[in-house]
Amino acid sequence: MNNVTWQTVHSEALRRIRTREWLPGARIPDEADLAAELGCARATVNRALRDLAEAGLLERRRKAGTRVPLNPVRKATFEIPIIRQDIESRGLTPGYRLLSRDLAPAPEDLARGLAGEAQLLSVRALHLADGIPFCLEERWINPVTAPGVLVADLTGISANEWLVQNTSFTGGDIAFGALNADPATARLLDCAPGAALFIIDRTTRTGEALITSVRLSYAPGHRMQAMI
Amino acid sequence: MNNVTWQTVHSEALRRIRTREWLPGARIPDEADLAAELGCARATVNRALRDLAEAGLLERRRKAGTRVPLNPVRKATFEIPIIRQDIESRGLTPGYRLLSRDLAPAPEDLARGLAGEAQLLSVRALHLADGIPFCLEERWINPVTAPGVLVADLTGISANEWLVQNTSFTGGDIAFGALNADPATARLLDCAPGAALFIIDRTTRTGEALITSVRLSYAPGHRMQAMI
DNA sequence: CAGTGGTCTAGACCACTCC
DNA sequence: GAGTGGTCTAGACCACTGT
């Protein structure tokens, strides 16, 4: 390989941003100039700068050129593993207990975008780590977009895992928050009523159609981490 | 531009993954074959498959080829805006009140990696949205890696914003969780003691040296959202 | 209109890693 | 050792957008 790789350009550009050799708000040389200066092809510069732009450290616009943003919006990427793997990666032994599984009318907030009197599968399950309650999974599954789920055996494999392996989604949204444990949840998670629980609400869709919507309530003390 | 762009290849590959034309666990054709089949250059296929691999939808290894993972680990990317911008983007009017600002010995968990008897600047501030408490910012700042912070006026601009504009970091970590509001925090956030608060702990470094460590305690009901 | 990034191509060589 | 992805190059044309 040549001496100058796109990583070379990447770190050199990063250096110039950090040392303020390239000032916030200022325009940086265009790709052709940088390629000539650093002694590589324009495509190599392009690859490096595109990478920095994706990370939010540069702003690129055709004709307007490339600038160092005044208020860099940093991004953090979280992996969303299946719960079992999450537990394993913490060095704990995963456990799983199916609590209930019923066909029921969709709750109001999910009814939008579903055919008239659609029934959804309601699944509630408890995930354990080293035998201790880890996370309560409360899920609605659309049997139309998750065919086979009505006859799937969810006692051995969690709905979480079954869905990952048997459906594929095109989009969705995820939200993090915190809620006080209500008495029933507290009992399941073996914590004090009112304890602060970390909450993940996630909805996945295929096209416009709902696949599943889930609330994960984590036992007190749970932390979700990432590097930036 | 030619008919077949990398996005073409990207969506075609996505289609094959979703329709299970490419089965989970199975190996897919190599780049050269796909390029020939789709009628484009290998670099174009590479760009598309690399993109899918970064999103966790493919696994690539030299010599071993490219596979569809059995348990795709999806990723969610969160933007970490400065708090003022976060409030504005919610359509609210941001407010800010500096609560305290003291030079003090570093707390134990931050003392590692600091020179012996290092003093840190402790800054506590309250962010308001439409006049209502939004988020409590409790921050430690290292005056060595954030030069100028000791004389910065943090009454008009938050430490958050000052740091974004005046320092640059090379890495750090972020963690989300939930905590019950202690009485003092409850008073500041105008909520009930014990209310579940969404918590962000963030530490940023330049090289190995600490720049700042902050805990953001959000008023009850706060949600952090992203698309996936 | 013209400058800048976005992308494609064809060929080449390299680096990793499975066999 | 050999197959596969990783990357570089030089040139070309395109697409967007500021002026």
Image: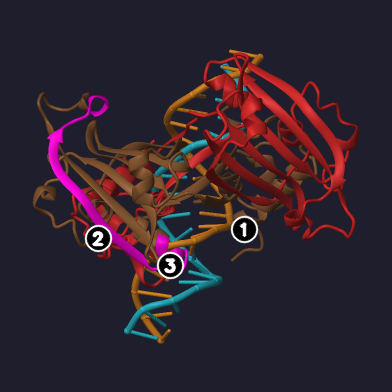
Chain colours: A red, B brown, C orange, D cyan
The chain identifier of the residue carrying mark 3 reads B
Taking the magenta stretch, the answer to whether it contains residue B95 is: yes
Q: Residue at x 64, y 45 (%)?
A: A202
The chain identifier of the residue carrying mark 1 reads B
The amino acid beneath tag 1 is: Thr
User: What range is drawn magenta here?
Assistant: B87-110
Dots 1 and 3: beta carbons under 8 Å? no
* Residue in the foreground of this view, choosing between D13 and B183: B183
Q: Nearer the viewer, mark 2 or mark 1?
A: 2
* Residue in the foreground of this view, choosing between A148 and A221: A221
Query: Which type of secondary structure does the marked residue at label 3 adopt?
Result: loop
Crowd tier of the residue under label 1, counting other residues whose Cα lies within 10 Å: few below 14, some 14–19, many 20 or above: some
* Residue in the foreground of this view, choosing between B92 and B11: B92
The amino acid beneath tag 3 is: Leu
Q: Are marks 3 and 2 on the same chain?
A: no
Number of numbered tags placed on the structure image: 3
Q: CA distance from mark 2 to mark 1?
A: 34 Å
Q: Residue at x 62, y 56 (%)?
A: B7
Which corner quadrant of the image does residue A139 belong to?
top right
Dots 3 and 2: beta carbons under 8 Å? no
Q: Position of residue B212 (x, y in %)?
A: 25, 40
Q: Are marks 1 and 3 on the same chain?
A: yes
Q: Residue at x 77, y 27 (%)?
A: A99
Crowd tier of the residue under label 2, counting other residues whose Cα lies within 10 Å: few below 14, some 14–19, many 20 or above: many
The chain identifier of the residue carrying mark 2 reads A
Quickly name the residue at label 1.
Answer: B5
Quickly name the residue at label 3.
Answer: B92
Quickly name the residue at label 2.
Answer: A24
Query: Which type of secondary structure does the marked residue at label 1 adopt?
Result: loop
Q: Nearer the viewer, mark 1 or mark 3?
A: 3
